[in-house]
Structure formats: C-alpha cells, structure tokens
Amino acid sequence: MEFIRNELQETIRSSAVDFAQNYLKPRVEEIETAEQFPEDLFHIMADMGFLSLSYPESYGGLGAGYLTLSMVLEEIARVSPSAATLLTVCLLPLDAIHLFGTEAQKQKYLVPGIQGAYRGSLAFTEPGTGSDPKQLTTVAKGGNGKYLISGTKRFISNAAYKGPIVVVARDEGADTCTAYIVEKFCKGYSLSKPWDKIGLHGSHVYDVFLDDVEVTEADILGGYGKGFDLLIGTTTYGKLAFSAVFTGIMDGAYDLAVKYAKEKLHRGSPISKFPSMQDKAARVAANTLSSRLMLYKAAEDADTITNDIRRVQASAALVKGYIADLAVETCTMALNMHASYGVTAEYQVERFLRDAVIAPNIEGSADIQRLIAGSYILKSAEHFL
C-alpha cells in the first residue's frame, strides 16, 4: 500500500521538516538537559499551525485531517520526541472539546487552544485506577447545577501551565462518570513536583490534587454520566497521535544507525559492509516502514470513515499496540548497531530508546490495544483489512 501526499500534505509536512531541522535540532540538548520545553518553540509550533491541523476551518483550524497531522508529528518526533509529545498532549483536551463540547465551550476553549493561547490537560488516570471508571476515587458531589470535585489524578501533562483541564470524575453514588472542564489553579487545585521519567524529558507529568473544586452545569463536557464515552472517543485520536510520535522515534533511531554504520571504520572498511550490520539495518528499516504504513492507514480511516466509529477505534488500537512494542525493538537494534557507543549520550541513539520504552505504557497498554482490535475484528461482519 502506498500513500501519495497531496499538495497540501506535502506543503505542511515540509514545513514540519523545516521547523524540526532549523528550530528544534539546535536545541535538542537544551531540552534534554533542562527537562523543559522552551516557551518560544511552543509558540512557533502554534504559529505554524501544528495545533490546528485536524480541526475545522470554522474554529480556526486547517481542516487537513489526521493523516496530515500524523505526518507532522512523525517528522517532529524524528528530531525531538519531546516536542511531538507536547503537541500530542495539548491536542487531547482539544479533541475532547471538539468532539463533545457545546458550541459555547468550543468558542471559549477550542478556538484559543488551536492558536496556542494555553496548554490544556486531560485528567483520568489515578493512583489506583486502570481503564475502569468504576475504580475512580475522584468524585463530583452535589447537584442542582453545582458540583464539588475532590480526588487525585496521576501522570497529568501540562498540569503546571494555566488553561483548562478536562477532569473525569465518578458520579456520586453511581458507577458512571462525567467529564468537567476545570480552570487550572482555581481554588482547590494544586499539584506535585514533576515525576522523574526515563525519557521524554521535555514533557513533564504531575499528580494533580483536587480539593472541593467547584464546577457548574456549564462545565460538564459531553453530558452527565457520559465521561467514559468521552474518554473512548478522545483517546482514539490520542492513540493515533502517539503512534505517529513513536513512528518518528523509529525514524530518528534509523537515521542515526545508518549514519553510524556508513561512517564507522573497522580495519579501514565501513562496518556497513558487514552482513550482521546489513541484517540489523534491514530489520530496522522494515519495522519503521511497516509502522508508518499501518499508521497512515489508521489515520486515513479516521479521516474517511464516518459511519463506523468502532472500526476507527479498532484501527487506532491495532496500530498503537503494534507500534508500541515495535518502537522498543527497533530502537534497541539501532542502539546495538552502535555497539558500546550506543549507550553513550554523545551518540544520541540511547535517547531514542529511552523515549521508546514509554510507548507500551501510555494511552493504553499494548496488550489491551490488541484485545480491543481483536474483539472488533472477530465480531465485525465486514472484512477488516
């Protein structure tokens, strides 16, 4: 299967390559060392329209679709996975508001968010919670149009930046949950120090503490008791975005491994002539190419399939589960192509591996993604492939 970029896609992809090479690449070490993504680079990404790609023109978006967005995230992650991850976590609350928000909520939050006016957050995960909303301990108590939210959310991106956070809380006395739009740093909002992570150092995650945070009926996103539906819909597109990030990580590891093999000499000859290196290079290339093709097919499904959202969800789950494991395998092979130099920071490939090992553990485990996809494949009356 071959994807031929149209003129708009090629123009936008080229702008992402230009940004990555000319703005990101000179500052990758700064991002890695400071463990902070520079504010000026975030605003450049917003000004270049990278936050607006998948949203309608009526809200200030470019209407370019998820396939184009995947291409952009891949090219940015090829140089800086942290930058691509930052874009992805900013898109999650925007997706939630775009898919489930009222017109008033879209005008208030989606329009400025697309322009980069804030860094939003999505908060579902808790210290003792997997993917089951019945396990949520964060509860919204009240009624008659007013609710008080209390609880702890874990591994929340962008929590230290002003802007909205979409909080999913259990409904008092029920097994259902509801999503609310909360303004960060309102009364009752606080957070922990950032977690120390193995990789993706430019994108921090925090624990968020909510102590009787007051919200109203107007802050409910997607309907009362419909929080899990919102999560499923929103994370479908989050899985595609993260899959693009981890495909880009494989691209970056591939670039470094091929360059090293061509330049490193052993007894006067480049090690690229050794059969063992050729075998590893072929496997790294095959893994990366197959991931890209699966990603683009799933993104195309998201752009074109409007009458079967479960198929889109299955496609996103399938590609996320596949790429998550393959990213680790591919970056490990790329590191091994460097031999002992691979574990040194100077050769950078170790950074891609540290970033890649996060893949199976975010936006749903790889095992669960395969179960989601497999369930649809075996239940669907239509041929999936």
Image: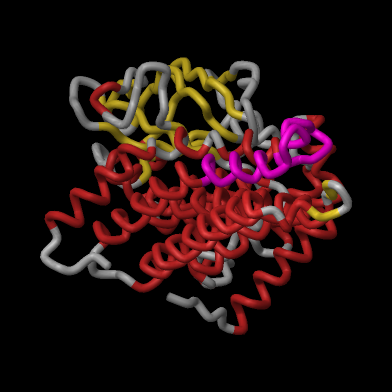
- In the rendered view of the protein, which quadrant contains the C terminus? bottom left
The answer to whether residue 191 is magenta is no
Q: Position of residue 346 (x, y in %)?
A: 83, 36
Left or right: where 297 falls relative to 310: right
Q: Is residue 263 above or below residue 381?
A: above
Residue at (58%, 58%) from the top-left corner? 282
Q: Position of residue 143 (x, y in %)?
A: 27, 27
Q: Quadrant of the N terminus?
A: bottom left
Tag count = 0
Residue drawn at x 50%, y 39% is: 359
In the depicted view, which residue is nearer to us: 24 or 266?
266
- 341 drawn magenta: yes
Q: Residue at x 75, y 32 (%)?
A: 340
User: On the image, which quarter does residue 176 sit in?
Assistant: top left
Q: Is 63 above or below relative to 152?
A: below
Judge from the rendering whether residue 75 lies leftward or rightward of residue 61; answer left or right: right
Stretch in magenta: 327-349
The residue nearer to you, when weighing 285 against 175, is 285
Rendering quarter of residue 183: top right
Viewer-proximal residue among 325 and 149:
325
| Residue 12 place in picture, x, y as percent | 66, 72
Left or right of 65 on screen, residue 29: right
Colour scheme shown: secondary structure
Residue farthest along the bottom direction in this orientation = 7
Residue 100 position within the rendered picture, expressed as x and y whole percent measured from the top left: 36, 52
The structure residue drawn at horizontal position 66% and vertical position 60%, both measured from the top left corner, is 75
Residue 111 shows in the view? no
Left or right: where does residue 68 sit relative to residue 29?
Answer: left
Establish if 340 lies above or below 256: above
- Asked whether 18 or 93 is in front, the reply is 18
Magenta span dominant secondary structure: helix
Q: In the rendered view, tell whether residue 285 sits above or below residue 177.
A: below
